[in-house]
Image: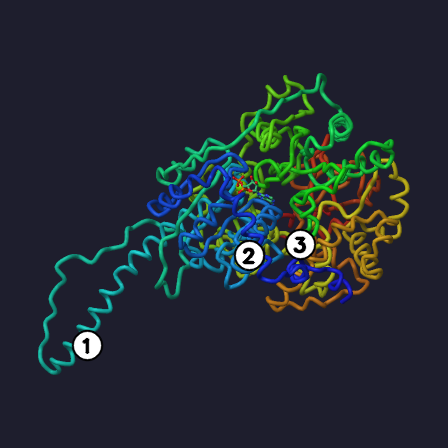
């Protein structure tokens, strides 16, 4: 398969950079001084001591103080067993693992490694494993007591991502269960002893009457705590207690402490230089433009030796837009202006392109780092003195009437302060907020935890698969609304992942194997019967990235025309499939991608995802080569079996209304279905900008919708 040869997973890449052992040691030796000058170093012994004494410890420390990179190493050096360190984002997990491997002086994937969705760079030898919080959740499915870890570090807990919150609850339970098992294990020697005694007496007293003494004390009964985990089987010998460390960059750690039975909180002093903060005098209509111009202003008005610039934007699309604007401006710099190097960093950035963010810029060049809130607290990027804060971030929002959507929203004050802080880590710095001071005053103090605002079907499926029978009773730190939980249960029921008693079905268990939203795993499941697994996997992979095309604002017509060759009359899903086929034919050729305005970076990611999905399906004994050839309706029907809740019907007035909540749904201008009228559509996702926009839209026959989910839309059979 030519495509797979194009897709080089980063794990393959690493062998290319393999260096002899001495180099690793020499580098670690050089980094030692840096390690010992970090603020956290003086707290080393205190931290280790607290972790020894308490099952759970909360560590709070300013970004850059050394929590993420140092504490795992302190554990390693103090003889603790295997440790998992979770991060909310892939890029953080991979780049921090790389840094820690350097500091430890081992090749990445050896003693220090990482595992993220669709990518594993670890081995049996790995003692410090950096992973995403989602990945550790998945590990619980196959290893309910996480027995391979002695310590789990939940990093960036202040972010309160959906998966961090679920992990908090699961870990609390696992910790309790492991304590119980560990106490039972303590009794094991006694049990052996008694057994020997019995056989001894039996032997000696063969044929005679033997009386056994009643034990004087009642055997210690394990504490009767109701456990939500009911699928722990097998050998439990050798399981010790689980240590949990919760790390946060903001001061409000009392809630974590209270949640973990008054766990001690350790405060690590930070180092922060003063930062001068500027606001705009008037609100900015276009923050992308404002960000671009502000960055240019800083670049041209301050010497390039005065430090790099960090720009906070909402997501990959924003970042790529500003990157392009900056490159265009830089192309026409008058002589004498130093070069600028835009460096994007966002969650889905391939490993191979991450390092330029951390590497020093070439001489006479200034780095302008374009980041999402990943650079707020999880990554430490050296050399930053200027911060430009757009004041927005992308969040998931959920409304049972329309399902989940992505929204670009104002950040919280707490985020704004973190962003500002990034300018003053190494020296006094400057922060330019692209909003007015009175707008700042109106920001919320903190962001709402994600669990309260997003769709829960995937985590509910995971909880069910991990043996949590009653998710309504789960010990959430912040309880999601009953409505949202019920909606998730209902959706899983409609997908046939749960039966009418709310119990996991065989299909539900199968679906939980996939690191995908349940809708997608349902599509893959349906594709077996329909004989189009290859196409289903292709399209699911294509949908895993934000955008497949570049649509430069000034070249909209041109890019539209270039992309017409891929366009399918049935909509975006098949258009994307055409794109992938064409891309594979030319082997991902760079010029071809430029000519067709194809986002090559994202296409590479698509191929990675596809490779991993193919592997997973092969493991589950699915025939991934089954293709439906030209009968592409079959593919769309498979998608409907997972996306029947993302449908909209054409109204007499020419607008679309969502089938489940009668909300107005507008087709995204970037879609091949834009401005087309068809009786019914389904979509991959809703994005809220000024109105609800459906992205990745395809036309379907309304009858197919009814057939796809008789449970929900059975009525349509008679009315359609
Ligand atoms: P925290 O988790 O407390 O925010 P980290 O452990 O991530 O802090 O970072 C501690 C220090 O390690 C940083 O201040 C920086 O000096 C250094 N550091 C971390 N990652 C890198 C990197 N990729 N390149 C260079 N230095 C780094
Ligand atoms: Mg950190």
Residues packed near mark 1 inside 10 Å, few (<14), some (14 to 19) or many (20 plus): few
Residue at point 85%, 50% (across, down): 567
Q: Tell me which label, 3 or 1, sits earlier in the chain.
A: 1
Image quarter in which the N terminus is found: bottom right
Residue at point 57%, 51% (across, down): 97
Residue at point 60%, 37% (across, down): 398
Out of 140 and 40, give the one closest to the viewer.
40
Residue at the spot of label 2: 25
Q: Tell me which label, 3 or 2, sits earlier in the chain.
A: 2
Residue 207 visible at all = yes
Out of 717 and 622, give the one closest to the viewer.
622
Residues packed near mark 3 inside 10 Å, few (<14), some (14 to 19) or many (20 plus): many
Residue at the spot of label 1: 199
Left or right placement of residue 158 versus residue 546 in this view: left
Left or right placement of residue 660 versus residue 318 in this view: left
Out of 710 and 125, give the one closest to the viewer.
125
What's the distance in space between the residues labelled 3 and 1, CA to CA?
A: 61 Å
Left or right placement of residue 565 versus residue 377 in this view: right
Quadrant of residue 632 within the rendered picture: bottom right
Residue 651 visible at all = no
Residue 665 x %, y % = 73, 37
Residue at the spot of label 3: 641
What's the distance in space between the residues labelled 2 and 1, CA to CA?
A: 56 Å
What's the distance in space between the residues labelled 3 and 2, CA to CA?
A: 54 Å
Callout in the foreground (3, 1) = 1
């Amino acid at each position: 398969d030519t495509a797979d040869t194009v897709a080089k997973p980063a794990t393959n890449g690493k062998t290319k950079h393999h260096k002899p052992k001495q180099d690793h040691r020499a580098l670690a030796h050089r980094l030692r001084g840096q390690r010992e000058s970090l603020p956290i170093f003086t707290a080393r012994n205190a931290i280790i001591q607290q972790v020894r004494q308490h099952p759970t410890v909360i560590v709070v420390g300013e970004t850059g103080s050394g929590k993420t990179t140092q504490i795992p190493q302190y554990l390693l050096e103090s003889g603790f067993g295997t440790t998992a360190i979770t991060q909310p984002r892939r890029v953080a997990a991979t780049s921090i693992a790389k840094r820690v491997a350097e500091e430890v002086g081992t090749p990445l994937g050896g003693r220090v490694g990482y595992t993220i969705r669709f990518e594993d760079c670890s081995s049996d030898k790995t003692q410090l494993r950096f992973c995403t919080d989602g990945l550790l959740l998945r590990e619980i499915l196959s290893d309910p007591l996480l027995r391979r870890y002695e310590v789990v570090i939940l990093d960036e807990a202040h972010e309160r991502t959906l998966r961090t919150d679920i992990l908090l609850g699961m870990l609390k339970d696992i910790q309790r269960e492991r304590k119980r098992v560990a106490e039972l294990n303590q009794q094991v020697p006694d049990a052996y002893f008694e057994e020997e005694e019995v056989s001894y007496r039996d032997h000696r007293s063969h044929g005679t009457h033997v009386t056994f003494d009643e034990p004087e004390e009642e055997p210690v009964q394990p504490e009767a705590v109701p456990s939500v985990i009911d699928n722990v089987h097998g050998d439990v010998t050798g399981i010790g207690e689980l240590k949990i460390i919760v790390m946060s960059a903001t001061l409000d750690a009392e809630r974590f402490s209270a949640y973990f039975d008054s766990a001690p909180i350790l405060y690590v002093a930070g180092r922060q230089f003063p930062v001068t903060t500027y606001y705009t005098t008037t609100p900015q209509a276009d923050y992308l433009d404002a960000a671009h111009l502000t960055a240019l202003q800083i670049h041209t008005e301050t010497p390039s030796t005065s430090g790099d610039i960090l720009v906070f934007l909402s997501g990959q699309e924003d970042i790529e837009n500003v990157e392009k604007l900056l490159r265009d401006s830089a192309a026409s710099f008058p002589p004498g202006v130093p070069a600028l190097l835009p460096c994007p960093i966002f969650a889905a950035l391939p490993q191979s392109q991450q390092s330029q963010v951390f590497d020093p810029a070439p001489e006479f060049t200034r780095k302008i780092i374009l980041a999402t809130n990943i650079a707020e607290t999880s990554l430490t990027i050296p050399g930053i003195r200027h911060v430009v804060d757009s004041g927005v971030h992308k969040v998931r929002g959920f409304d049972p009437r329309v399902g989940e959507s992505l929204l670009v929203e104002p950040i919280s004050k707490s985020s704004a302060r973190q962003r500002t802080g990034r300018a003053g880590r190494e020296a006094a710095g400057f922060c330019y907020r692209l909003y007015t001071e009175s707008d700042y005053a109106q920001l919320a103090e903190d962001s709402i935890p994600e669990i309260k605002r997003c769709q829960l079907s995937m985590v509910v499926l995971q909880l069910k698969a991990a043996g949590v029978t009653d998710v309504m009773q789960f010990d959430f730190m912040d309880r999601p609304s009953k409505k949202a939980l019920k909606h998730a249960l209902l959706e899983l029921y409609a997908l046939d992942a749960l039966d009418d008693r709310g119990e996991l079905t065989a299909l539900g268990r199968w679906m939980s194997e996939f690191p995908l939203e349940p809708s997608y795993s349902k599509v893959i499941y349906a594709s077996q019967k329909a004989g189009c697994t290859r196409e289903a996997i292709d399209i699911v992979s294509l949908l895993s990235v934000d955008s497949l095309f570049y649509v430069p604002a000034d070249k909209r017509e041109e890019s539209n025309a270039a992309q017409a060759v891929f366009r399918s009359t049935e909509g975006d899903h098949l258009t994307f499939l055409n794109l992938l086929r064409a891309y594979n034919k030319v082997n991902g050729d760079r010029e071809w991608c430029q000519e067709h305005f194809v986002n090559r970076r994202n296409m590479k990611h698509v191929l990675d995802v596809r490779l991993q999905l193919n592997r997973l399906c092969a493991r589950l004994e699915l025939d991934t080569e089954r293709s439906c050839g030209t009968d592409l309706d079959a593919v769309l029907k498979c998608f409907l079996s997972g996306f029947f809740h993302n449908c909209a019907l054409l109204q007499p007035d020419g607008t679309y209304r969502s089938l489940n909540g009668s909300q107005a749904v507008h087709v995204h201008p970037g879609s091949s279905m834009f401005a087309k009228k068809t009786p019914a559509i389904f979509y991959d996702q809703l994005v809220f900008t000024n109105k609800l926009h459906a992205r990745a839209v395809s036309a379907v026959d309304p009858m197919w919708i009814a057939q796809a989910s008789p449970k929900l839309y059975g009525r349509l059979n008679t009315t359609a």
